[in-house]
Amino acid sequence: MRDFERLFCIIGKGYGFSYEGLVALYNYLKENERWVNGRRLDLTDIISVFSGFREYENFADFANDYGEYKSIEEIKRDFYIVIPIDKNRFLVKLPEVLW
């Protein structure tokens, strides 16, 4: 694992992400080559990324914050970025946080 990936995981744990959630988020960012202010994300951007996402254990956990949803597709319609972790868990880009 490269230094950036290692630091990504270390910092992310402090924001309440599981290891699997961090891997899913990292892979999403890497695959989509996320850019901020005209440049690629780097370690200085990571804190804003972590504060912009929340990991949910299941739909019931998500419903506690945002009401009843029945599928990932419904959540994507309203929240734009939803990153599955496994069959139950997923990450959601919070609508009130921009990065």
Image (cartoon, grey):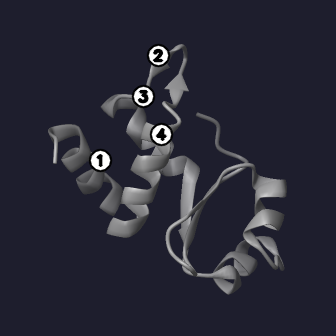
Could you say where residue 56 lies in the image, as x and y percent from the top left?
57, 73
Amino acid bearing label 1: Phe
The residue singled out by tag 1 in the image is 8
The residue singled out by tag 2 in the image is 39
Q: How many marks?
A: 4
Tell me which label, 3 or 4, sits earlier in the chain: 4
Amino acid bearing label 3: Leu
Whole-number angstrom distance, CA of label 4 to CA of label 2: 15 Å
| Picture layout, residue 63 above or below residue 19 | below
| Picture layout, residue 49 above or below residue 37 | below
* Most foreground residue, 7 or 85: 85
The residue singled out by tag 4 in the image is 31
**Label 2 near label 1: C-beta < 8 Å?**
no
As drawn, the label of residue 41 is 3
For the residues carrying marks 4 and 1, which lies nearer the camera in this image? Answer: 4
Whole-number angstrom distance, CA of label 1 to CA of label 3: 12 Å
As drawn, the label of residue 71 is none
